[in-house]
Image: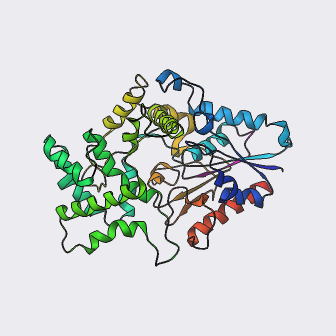
Amino acid sequence: MNYIIVHTPGESGIQPQVTTHSFISELAANFSGLLINIEHRYYGESFPPIDDLSTPNMKDLTIDQALFDFANFIKNPPKELGIPKDAKWITVGGSYAGNLAAWMRKQFPKDVFAAYASSAPVEAKLDFFEFDQGVSKALPCAQNISDAFNFVFDPILMSGNETAIFQLKQQFGLEMIEDNLDFASAISHPTSRIVQTYVPPPSSDQLDNIVAICGPFAQAPESSPQVSALIYIEGVKAFLNITGLITPEDKIKKFATSAISTKEKNDLASFTYQYCSELGYYQTAPKPPLLSTRSQTITIDYYQGQCDFLFPGITSSPTIKETNKKFGGFNGKFSRTIFVNGDIDPWTALTVSSESANPKVEKDTIFLVKGGSHVSDFAPPSPSDSESLKEARVFVFNTLVKWLK
């Protein structure tokens, strides 16, 4: 047990399948090591005993505090685990937790031997319009969706005609959303979620979600913004019926009710607080002529309004400059850290695989999965995995072997 893998789920509670049925659990088994899952403060069962979600009660939710929590565990592990003093600790995480894995190695190099970060958006950014560019790049029908927003939905939303706006909401079956911007967010959300979580089907006779989105546009007898709008409306209605989702912003306004569970409420509040305070990640629409699969009405001000609504007095804007200065962003210096990203993952624009990134890393420590989505490498290996995904996992294993042996 000289190899200890420390995984954190980041912005959620511990997920048992990571311990029992994932690439992470296979890594630990292959190294005959110990896998430890540690929750991030303010998430899952590790939410503090506070009376409410007021801004003062959230002040101890910071990146630094989370890193010190993990470092304290590594320096002082429970004696009953019997971890030898010369054990090599490897931090692992995906998405925001991937940031933490990389930053643990960066901030505590004497305690953390190596790190493995999947889909880690290490660059804090306020106006994250590149996210939508990534969604558009992955969708063959992005032009159709962009036309639907630019020539049909947004002109109505920006018209000030409440009757027309209400009728548009009715077409989507979302007339219960009172705020017009929340509605715009709700109808912008489905395509990005599908692309972010995309997994190619195991066989050609099974549903491909991207084909499911774009197929109706290609099969339409004519192509016009109006036809694209009708097709998009039906697609969004089907998505919402299947998933039961509306939008995170809509949930924010239900915090005072019993509409969502306490754990879900806490996790959502906590990550909202983190992007409002230190990370940004405001997903806005690229400006024309760039393609956009979301409404132009969703701006930085919209997200900041959500922050001000939930956490009055938090900050006038997230402290992204300080975050990037402290941890290096995607131009930072990272040693003995493996980065795996997906080329259709919209978050890749903020990772070290971004075209704008210039990280200082050792040779051959970054792998870009062809057709890979967000944290796709953490899933349990499957015979249907793409060759690139298989290569990514071999790359991770061989790199760790090289460092450990």
Q: Residue at x 45, y 56 (%)?
A: 196
Q: Pinpoint residue 170: horizontal percent, then vertical percent.
A: 22, 50
Q: How many marks?
A: 0
Q: Which residue is drawn at 36% across and 51% down?
A: 189
Instruction: Please state which of residues 49 and 300 is positioned toward the viewer in this rendering.
Output: 49
Q: Which residue is drawn at 28% across and 55% down?
A: 290
Q: Is residue 260 left or right of residue 31?
A: left
Quadrant in the picture for residue 74: top right
When the figure is inspected, residue 71 is found, relative to residue 296, above or below; the finding is above
Outermost residue to the front: 258
When the figure is inspected, residue 150 is found, relative to residue 222, above or below; the finding is above
Q: Pinpoint residue 120: horizontal percent, then vertical percent.
A: 54, 49
Q: Quadrant of the C terminus?
A: bottom right
Instruction: Please state which of residues 144 and 245 is positioned toward the viewer in this rendering.
Output: 245
Q: Pinpoint residue 394: horizontal percent, then vertical percent.
A: 67, 65
Quadrant in the picture for residue 208: bottom left
333 within the magenta span: no
User: Is residue 46 visible to us here?
Assistant: yes
> Range of the magenta residues?
109-119
